[in-house]
Amino acid sequence: MRPVALRTDRLLLDAPQWADAELVTRYCQDPLFERYLTTPWPYTRADADEFLGRFVPEAWATGAELTWAIRRSTGGAILGVISVRSTECELGFWLGAEHRGAGIMSEAASAVCEWVLDGGIPGASAVRWRAVEGNVASARVARAAGFRRIHPVEPTVPTRDGGTLPAWHAIRHPTVAADAAASWDDVLESPR
Ligand SMILES: CC(C)(COP(=O)(O)OP(=O)(O)OC[C@H]1O[C@@H](n2cnc3c(N)ncnc32)[C@H](O)[C@@H]1OP(=O)(O)O)[C@@H](O)C(=O)NCCC(=O)NCCS
């Protein structure tokens, strides 16, 4: 599959480039990534080179994982990354620390879900999300993007060392469920 660019009011989502490596390296050294993601830790420039130079293009080519760089609509510096693993249609995302708190990820996540569910991934009828229990910022993004919390038998997420941690899970269908927002009430406060 060839990389597909997506646009929202404020953002351009396009293929991550090797030129993004310096910023990706810095962003991924954020201690929150050690806690909440499975990206390598400690994160080095070589990890960014491998991610951008090999993993991202190969995963687009095979369709295994579709990864976008998040940029302002005029292009320019990478702000963060969002991806979908096509087998389970699972959404993953992160933003550089200085770009958080402005609704950027909620906007990007909604756009990617709508693209996936509108035929971007043929046959996909739902997008899944999960995060380590307590990752409130990620859960607020999922709620804002129309996900409804679900309670699987094993509510876990894999860790970078092959273990698992307790996790929150959610699902987004083409039509946002009427009880989607309320499904977060026991773990999240009202939207700001
Ligand atoms: C998850 C992440 C991308 C969210 O970024 P963000 O900039 O907060 O996203 P948005 O601005 O779109 O905000 C979404 C909501 O979270 C809220 N929020 C942001 N930071 C928060 C925090 N630390 N605690 C609680 N709420 C927070 C925003 O106010 C907004 O709330 P609202 O929709 O109720 O108004 C960012 O925190 C991040 O990169 N974290 C580290 C990596 C990570 O955990 N990725 C997800 C793995 S599952």
Image (cartoon, grey):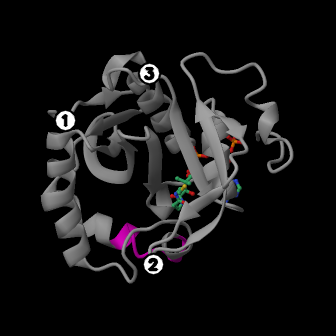
Q: Is residue 145 at least partly visible in the picture?
A: no
**In which quadrant will I find the C terminus?**
top right
Q: Is residue 73 above or below residue 79?
A: above
Where disc 1 sits, the SS reads: loop
**In which quadrant will I find the N terminus?**
top left
Residue at which label 3 appears: 117
147 horizontally vs 53: left or right: right
Q: Position of residue 120 (x, y in %)?
A: 32, 23
Please state which amino acid type lies under the numbered disc 3. Leu
Q: Position of residue 133 (x, y in %)?
A: 69, 61
Gap in Å between the C-alphas at discs 2 and 1?
A: 30 Å
Please state which amino acid type lies under the numbered disc 1. Pro
Please state which amino acid type lies under the numbered disc 2. Asp
Residue occupying the far front of the picture: 153
Instruction: Bin the neighbour count of mark 2 within 10 Å (Cα to Cα): few under 14, some 14-19, many 20 and up.
Output: few
Towards the viewer: 156 or 177: 156
Residue at which label 2 appears: 161
Q: Which residues are magenta?
A: 26-32
Instruction: Bin the neighbour count of mark 3 within 10 Å (Cα to Cα): few under 14, some 14-19, many 20 and up.
Output: many
